[in-house]
Amino acid sequence: MSELEFPNLPSVRGKLTANRDLSSLTWLRVGGEADYLFQPADIEDLQHFMAHLPAEMAVFPMGVGSNLIVRDGGLRAVVIRLGRGFNGIETKGDLVTAGAAALDAHVARKAADAGLDLTFLRTIPGSIGGAVRMNAGCYGSYTADHFVSAQIVTRDGALQEISAEELQFQYRQTEFPEGAVLVSARLQAPAGDPVALHARMEAQLKKRDETQPTKDRSAGSTFRNPAGFSSTGRADDVQDLKAWKVIDDAGLRGAQLGGAQMSEKHSNFMINTGGASAADLEALGEDVRKKVYANSGITLEWEIMRVGEPLSE
């Protein structure tokens, strides 16, 4: 692609699209246009683009859109979405190296094939890039527990390795460098029997499908669990500080606003029942936060990332 097509942007070997509607790229199927969407061919293509992108242009790295609301007015940025050139998965010894675009479920399966236990990733929607950035976790295990290092391309185009200490893993968040794009991560995993690991993942999937609205348009958990508690899946797991519990206690299971609804099946899952706008979803979430606080004094924090601008009147 030549500079003549986009005179203010660097030439690329990947795909660069102007005014790209993002709704089809998010699991909730809402959102306006990004100024540009860039899908780099490989790391070198990404580095060149970042190094020569005008400094005033914002960059927003986007995964598979599984935990994201893009507001209806769109995003004034270059959205960078990694694809086929960034989804490789390799195992060596007790290490698993995965491209940022590799799906969490694929990493868990490939690791299990090699006798490595990353089974906690199997039911987490999204890709490894998002899992690292959000310290994704399930069944009492977090990405931080297995993280060794990651490679990032910084806003000026440099390829760097980043450590756990630099990321400062916390509950559902990290201190990620502004404007950087994560391109791969290395995880350490304990050994396990491949047959047993796959059987465990099948059981986890069965439980997920029984308790979560997996056939609806959702973005996973809407709110973080209060006080940083997270479901372990154990029989003795205390539920009184779980987001779904305080939502239920406020009488908000099944609450609706326009096409947005808190799922009847799992009240911490917000779903698009059809025709919801990003504004519907965000307004319902804010209403839930307000009513939960009024009922329990607990302030729920969003787990779904919300970006972009509301639709102008």
Image (spheres, helix red, strand yellow):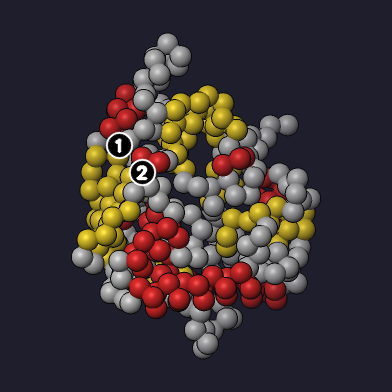
Picture coordinates of residue 142 (x, y %)? 39, 68
Q: Is disc 2 placed on a helix, strand or loop? A: helix
Label 2 neighbourhood size at 10 Å, few (<14), some (14-19), many (20+)? Answer: some
Is 192 left, or right, of 16 in this rendering?
A: left
Which residue is disc 1 drawn over? Answer: 43
Q: Say how many tags the image has.
A: 2
In the image, residue 207 above or below residue 25? below
In the image, residue 243 above or below residue 173? below
- Which residue is nearer to you in this view: 137 or 59? 137
Picture coordinates of residue 60 (x, y %)? 45, 38
Report which quarter residue 31 is drawn in: top right
Which residue is disc 2 drawn over? Answer: 86
Picture coordinates of residue 266 (x, y %)? 66, 69
In the image, residue 6 above or below residue 290? above
Which residue lies at the image location 62% right of the left edge and 40% below the top edge?
23
Please identify the quadrant where the N terminus is shown: top left
Q: Residue furthest front?
A: 195
Pointer 2 or 1: first along the chain: 1
- Which residue is nearer to you in this view: 11 or 155? 11
Is 256 left, or right, of 233 in this rendering?
A: right
Is 70 left, or right, of 131 in this rendering?
A: right
* Callout 1 amino acid: Ile
* Callout 2 amino acid: Phe
> Is mark 2 in CB contact (under 8 Å) with mark 1?
yes
Q: Is residue 269 visible?
A: no
Q: Is disc 1 placed on a helix, strand or loop? A: helix
Is 280 left, or right, of 143 in this rendering?
A: right
Picture coordinates of residue 245 (x, y %)? 64, 75
In the image, residue 213 above or below residue 274? below
Spatial CA distance of label 2 from label 1 is 8 Å
Which residue lies at the image location 75% right of the left edge and 49% below the top edge?
274
- Which residue is nearer to you in this view: 68 or 25? 25
